Amino acid sequence: MCEVENSFDVAIIGGGINGSSIAYQLAKMGRKVIILEKERLAFQASSAAAGMLAAQAEIEKDGPFFQLALKSQTMFSAISSEMLEYTGIDIEFVNKGMLKIAETEDLALELKKQVSFQQRWDPSIKWLDSSELREMEPSLSPDIPGGMYLPNDGHVQAEKLSQAFAKAAGYFGAVIRENTEVLSFIIENGQIKGIETTAGPIHCDQVVITAGAWTAKLLHKTGLDLSMYPVKGECFSVMTEKPLINTTIFSDKRCYLVPKRNGEIYIGATMVENTFDKKVTAGGISTLVERAIQLVPQLKDAAWERVWAGIRPQTGDGNPYIGEHPLLKGMFVAAGHFRNGILLSPITGKLVAELLDGRVMDETLLSAFRLDRHKELV
């Protein structure tokens, strides 16, 4: 019987989209990588996400987070081609734009200011009044006073992208072990030397924790308490006989509609803070149904498809944590991406791989995501 390999350059804890993206970039560089996932790959937030690439719809002010999102957004066309080449998986990258809807006149005034702000980076962004909105999307309610058209905010199939990153990492030699839980860390003189798991020890000099909303629990074992908490998001989908919408619809009332290639429309998402309970509630879904029908009245005749929920990792200041552990050499973290994990996955993979390789893509940009950016964290 062959011995199970247990010595690697890098161990990645968490088989979600960011862990797999990092593994892909590292394996391409020739590093010996293992992904450890306590359940199944992309089992949590990565498979629950609607896959929106909403760099300009969700982020409303300039800063490192916004710039990171813009950089990542530009990578998806190439990532789509790479994944198809290395894995045969079509991530269903759709770039038909997004409409950010203002449902009241007051919101319309605020959104017009956002148009002016966003046009600094993308002159093709524009304000559409009610009639122009309906010309683009005839099924939208005539009661909507206007919205911002974002031609470069697209979407992907999140679960397929997660699977593709993992399979592409495997193509370049990465090892994947599912149903393997991390129990503790092997540390010598402040340097990571390995991990104790339910399947035995893993020896390595570098570890990347990408465990989503569960990251803070793992890091607590190392003496580091991050400002991070779980946020449940409930979603549902419907099918229509013919397409109702072609563009992603995003409302300031925390409702979005994402039309997928197979005819489904994904509708989400609620936000319930500080819970790891993934049950879908009647109250949460009924609220989403009401909001969605207000936006697109014809949805009331759509066929019900399915419901689901995911647990997303949010941080105290809204910025993800990307960087090295301030107390342990060789331990790195990439977590806390909240609603933007899919969007940020390409840049997170590239950035963390370069960090582990001793390079920094942008020191100023990276400083905003350091684990010790708040004094109270260490």
Image (tube, rainbow, N blue to C red):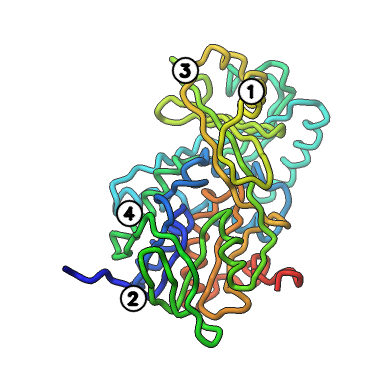
Q: Along the polypeptide, which appears first: circle 3 or circle 4?
A: 4
Can residue 119 be seen in this snapshot?
no
Which quadrant holds the N terminus? bottom left
Crowd rating for badge 3 (residues with CA inside 10 Å; few <14, some 14–19, many 20+): some
Q: Along the polypeptide, which appears first: circle 3 or circle 2?
A: 2
Single out the residue that lies furthest toward the left.
Answer: 1
Crowd rating for badge 4 (residues with CA inside 10 Å; few <14, some 14–19, many 20+): many
Q: What residue type is disc 4 on?
A: Lys
Disc 3, SS: loop
Q: Along the polypeptide, which appears first: circle 2 or circle 1?
A: 2
* Dot 2 and dot 4 residues touching (CB under 8 Å): no
- Whole-angstrom CA distance, mark 2 to mark 1, is 50 Å
- The residue closer to the viewer here, 242 or 204, is 204
Residue 37, given in percent of the width and then of the height, sits at 42, 57
Q: What residue type is disc 2 on?
A: Ser
Single out the residue that lies furthest toward the top.
Answer: 301
Q: Which residue is mark 2?
A: 7
Q: What residue type is disc 3 on?
A: Thr
Q: What residue type is disc 1 on?
A: Ser
Single out the residue that lies furthest toward the bottom.
Answer: 189
